[in-house]
Image: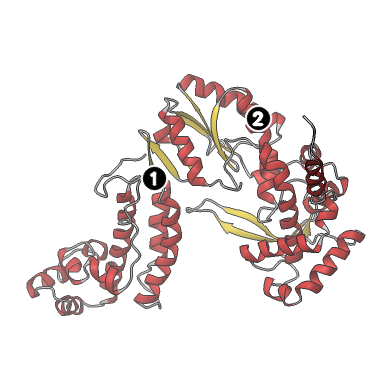
Amino acid sequence: MKIQPINQSKMRQQSLFVDKRSLFEKLCDQANLATGFEQVRKNGGSPGIDGVTIQEFSACLDKELAQLKKDLESWCYKPEPVRRVEIPKPGKGKGVRLLGVPCVRDRIVHATLKLLLEPIFDPTFSNHSYGFRPGRSPQKAVEAAKQIIKKGKEYVIDIDLSKFFDRVNHDRFIYLLSGRVTDKRILRLIGMILRSGVMDKGTVLLTREGTVQGSPLSPLLSNVVLDELDKELECRGLEFCRYADDCNIFVRSFKAANRVMDSISRFIEKKLKLKINWDKSKVGKSQDVKFLGMTIVRGTVAISVESMRRAWQKVKDLTPRGTYLNLEKTVTRINNWYTGWSGYYLITQYPYQLRVIEAHIRRRLRARFVYQQKRRRHLSNKLIKQGVPKKRAQEAAYSNKGIWALSRTYALNKAYPNRLFINEWGQKIRSEDKMKHWFNVRRWVKVR
């Protein structure tokens, strides 16, 4: 068949739009840097060690990006040390998580590098990897784990890596990058970023290993490192789900689970040069293991016991009995937290778990009302004023019950009914959303 000239013309026209520049040249493109800045602005965040905020940087955006482009092209660009920030881990006595806050201009470089490298690496990642990837989420990871367990693989090897972001070997990491990134200038720049140091209490500390947890680039880099683990698990024919450094492997028997835990832990510590947190890693049935805050019980998804306990503690922190905040501001603070918390945990199939948290919020506020009445007769008068029969109000006020026990009595529930919190004070309710995957709101599940 004779080739029509028009087809050749179309091919030539298409080739004109192929960007043949090197990765480093694309990085130095001011339009790409502007796109990186938009990502930084969208993510927000506090300033780095130079104190320059995103708003201040954007005030002279064209000038700042032009200077950044010039510095990159001339190799005058030098990443500043990141500002050390300590974030308490959830739960009492759990220690702190060390984060690093880069300067805004450094974050722009990181974000632009991520935009350039992600299309190269992401297609090569395992389908079982769900962390920090386009179109993937923790909810999808939990759903995938549920489907694997439904197939009969109910024994779980729960692997938790100890201080993963702080222990990445720089040389090995650059070697992994070089397998797909041929532009040596990009590798050199990433090496400079990894070794830029940390500013902690006025002192610059050298970083000989690890990546900055808090950089826009870190999630992609972590997936590059752990892709070796994914490929090893796939090579062994194991079914697993991984979200960042949280990995669950599923097998059919307890004996197989122990065997896989022994062999995979050796691979992680000897080949990948990473360390397993043995206090958090375990082998057990799915209902005894949590994954991303959820537990899979008999093929259904529920909020884990630990996540529920953290929620109760957070409610307690947000509703102190002695506080300068009025009720409206307290409810607003609770709603701000609960909207985000429940938005993630809507994946549960048991809305009763959300109802329990909502009820706990109301009980904490009722206890606060009791605490604010310094004398028993004041409490009795307050309850009567709220519509409680005099006899029931006095029985509650003059009983020997403590504040927490009183908050659950008929008198307090009559004085401050659920509808008052919801309709008058605007308490956020999510347990009545009636999601398609939910069971009846009265159905409860026991999680361990």
The quarter holding residue 286 reads: top left
Q: Amino acid at mark 1?
A: Val
Q: Is residue 252 above or below residue 327?
A: above
The residue mark sitting in front, 1 or 2, is 2
Residue at 37% across, 67% down: 319
Which of the two labelled residues, at mark 1 and mark 2, occupies the earlier sequence position?
Answer: 2
Q: Is residue 175 left or right of residue 309?
A: right
The quarter holding residue 68 reads: bottom right
Residue at 34% across, 75% down: 327
Q: Is residue 448 left or right of residue 267?
A: left
Residue at 92% across, 60% down: 74
Q: Amino acid at mark 2?
A: Lys
* Numbered circle sitting on residue 123: none
x then y, percent, for residue 78:
85, 60
x then y, percent, for residue 241:
54, 36
Quadrant where the N terminus lies?
top right
x then y, percent, for residue 43:
62, 62
Query: Disc 2 on helix, strand or loop?
Result: helix
* Numbered circle sitting on residue 305: 1
Res. 102 in view: no
Residue at 79% across, 44% down: 6
Q: Is residue 420 left or right of residue 244?
A: left
The quarter holding residue 296 reads: top left
Outermost left residue: 391
Of residues 271 and 144, the one drawn nearer to the viewer in this rendering: 144
Of residues 43 and 399, the one drawn nearer to the viewer in this rendering: 43
x then y, percent, for residue 298:
35, 33
Which residue was labeled with disc 2? Answer: 231
